[in-house]
Amino acid sequence: GENVEQHPSTLSVQEGDSAVIKCTYSDSASNYFPWYKQELGKRPQLIIDIRSNVGEKKDQRIAVTLNKTAKHFSLHITETQPEDSAVYFCAAIVGSARQLTFGSGTQLTVLP
Amino acid sequence: NAGVTQTPKFQVLKTGQSMTLQCAQDMNHNSMYWYRQDPGMGLRLIYYSASEGTTDKGEVPNGYNVSRLNKREFSLRLESAAPSQTSVYFCASTTGGGRLFNYGYTFGSGTRLTVV
């Protein structure tokens, strides 16, 4: 099955700096890569996603890049703010039922 | 439009007790999923139902059973709860597999289960 690895597990940045989280996946058939933000006690919320026919996608301060050859994708957050502090999960979809496989998560802390 | 509704939100069980977690969606989605989330980990797939009348095992199915009661409802049953099943359980749904997939997952708000 699919295996998604995520690094780093924790990340602290100063407010206004950039944050980068990286993920690798194993199944070359995966074709959809969402990123989720999860605040304490809440459900995961989709913040951005990318499909396999696209190399980069940007939405205001958030961007995702995908390298299909290397099987890795990354989340970039610029001009970080304290409200960006949360756990971020990458995921990959594979299978006819579009099952999601999640990375282990990154605890992002933005220091004021 | 409620989306995906899970009940209960919290539950404490004693080892060996049984219970059923309920999940219902009102978006006419074909596919439904049960995930568990342990501290410091990502969500792991327990079971899924690609369409009404079908269910399949995910990554961590041991100790669980599921029922796709109809298109709206997908329940998860713990027959004999164990402390290792202490976790947060999320139900989710999508439009469906194959060409039905619209690249969106809708998650419920979760059930926090503690087994003592």
Image (spheres, coloured by chain):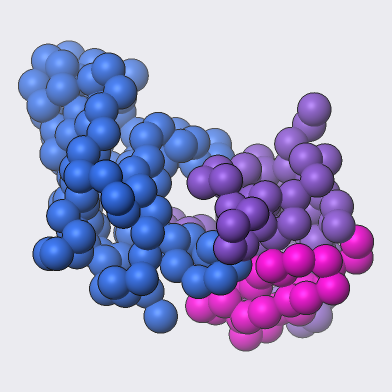
Residue A82 in the image, given as x and y percentages of width and height: 27, 18
Residue visible at 31% across and 74% down? A27
Residue visible at 36% across and 71% down? A29
Q: Quadrant of residue B69?
A: bottom right
Residue visible at 85% across and 52% down? B72
Q: Is residue B113 left or right of residue B71?
A: left
- Magenta segment range? B45-70
- Chain shown blue: that is A
Q: Is residue B42 left or right of residue A5?
A: right
> Does the segment drawn in magenta span residue A97?
no
Q: Quadrant of residue B46?
A: bottom right
Is B81 located above or below residue B87 in the figure?
below
Residue A17 in the image, given as x and y percentages of width and height: 8, 21
In this orientation, does residue B62 appear? yes
- Chain shown purple: that is B
> Quick one: quadrant of the N terminus of chain A?
bottom left
